[in-house]
Amino acid sequence: MSVEGIVLKHGEAHGVTLHETRVDYLVTAEQSKQCSLFEFTVAAGTKPGRMLLITAPSGHEKYFDERRDLIAKGGKPDPEALAKLRAKYDTVQLATLTPG
């Protein structure tokens, strides 16, 4: 089994912005079959908070892409559409990514 290294400098990762939260795709299904790796940067209070998220199996970036598309429609995303999206990707979201 062979493992290739992935080196990204700050700002090189592509991703999505979900309201005031930036999700950078560090490792996706293109690079790994086992997992995906994301860095969240949340605009909060005095300075941004950052979080690393690892998901298995890989491919969870599709969830964030589809969520971005729901937000792009304008207004508050339809709760039923969000529930279907979360179910599709077997996701339980504990905190909101949408403002108030």
Image (spheres, helix red, strand yellow):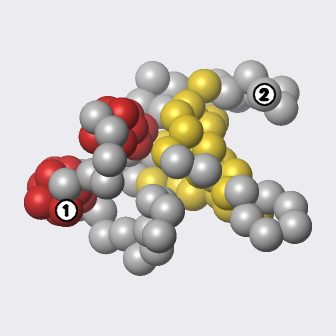
Residue 65 locus on image (x, y percent): 37, 34
Q: Residue 10: which disc? A: none
Packing grade of label 1 (10 A; few <14, some 14-19, many >=20) is: few
Please tell me whether mark 1 sits on a helix, a strand or a loop. Answer: helix
Q: Nearer the viewer, mark 2 or mark 1?
A: 1
Q: Classify residue 85 as left or right of residue 51.
A: left
User: Which residue in the structure is indicated by mark 2?
Assistant: 11
Q: Classify residue 14 as left or right of residue 80.
A: right
Q: Classify residue 52 as left or right of residue 18.
A: right
Q: Earlier in the sequence, mark 2 or mark 1?
A: 2
Question: What amino acid is found at the position of numbered circle 2 in the picture?
Answer: Gly
Picture quadrant where residue 15 is located: top right
User: Which residue in the structure is indicated by mark 1?
Assistant: 79
Residue 72 locus on image (x, y percent): 36, 34
Judge whether 49 appears above or below 29 on screen: below
Packing grade of label 2 (10 A; few <14, some 14-19, many >=20) is: few
